[in-house]
Amino acid sequence: MSAPVFVDAQASDAAVGSVMTVTGAEARHAVTVQRRAVGEIVDVVDGQGRRVRGEIVATGADSMTVAVSVVTRDDDPPVTLVQALAKGGRDEQAVEAAVELGVTAVIPWSAQRSIVQWRGPKAEKARRKWADLVWAATKQSRRATLAPVAAAVTSRELAVQVASATASGVRVLILHEESATPLTTLTWADPAQPVWLVVGPEGGIGDEEVALLTDAGAEPVVLGQHVLRASSAGPAAIAALAATRGTWADAALRGGLR
């Protein structure tokens, strides 16, 4: 069974043979909620890919001291999910599953057909809710990388970001049911090339938006013969992308702590 994960910035500097003490909310959750005890093995990650494994040697009401025995770094290929805001919590479901499947960054998108909109003071509150989902899903899936959640963007703002991303070597893919190019037929000179996956709302991506993003350098692709919900399209694409590029197989061959 894989070790439980706790997030603490101290993992960035921990070395084999050292002792680190996790305090605050993470320690309380470990000791009080999960009842982790002396002698158990845990992973402490810094959220930037660094993973520290060690044995709990002492606990307190709000502290957990770990003797570090192994230090590694997770090598997650950069995959950004651009998720359109969607009703019924389907956007939140997409973000949660995407993190479990390996996404490394999230951009909320206020698409033209998004019924849900983040405006005013509620925008930051909604973004923080997504960030909390990312935090929980990261720990549940035992990941060492905590995907940042950006501020929500409009379609025009997204197009500007897409143009900048593609200019720097990122491949931006728009999931679109009318595309004639299956995602699984794409070829990759570098399997670890950074990728953005753009997912529309329940009403779909408007023609103007597709044109706007395509002009900025994005490529429309289709997943398969079925039209997926906003909650499942992104996670399905992430899984298909990992299988097609072989990044899951590479991770299995590398082994590691999990």
Image (cartoon, grey):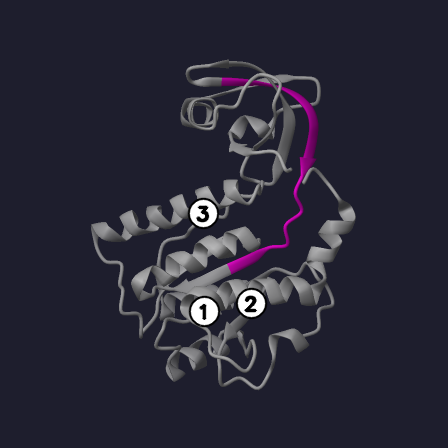
**Mark 3 and mark 1: span between their CA atoms?**
18 Å
Q: Please give the label number shown on residue 242.
A: none
Mark closer to the chain start, 3 or 1: 3
Residue at 47% x, 17% y is 63
Q: Where is residue 97 in the image (x, y as percent from the top left)?
A: 49, 56
Mark closer to the chain start, 2 or 3: 3
In this view, 144 is above or below 28: below
Label 1 neighbour load within 10 Å: few <14, some 14-19, many 20+: many
Residue position marked by numbered label 1 in the rendering = 199
Residue position marked by numbered label 3 in the rendering = 134
Q: Do the residues labelled 1 and 2 touch (CB within 8 Å)?
A: yes
User: Could you say which is closer to the camera, residue 49 or residue 142?
Assistant: 142
**Mark 2 and mark 3: span between their CA atoms?**
18 Å
- Is 100 on the left or on the right of 209, as rendered? right
Q: Please give the label number shown on residue 237.
A: 2
- Is 236 on the left or on the right of 190, as rendered? left
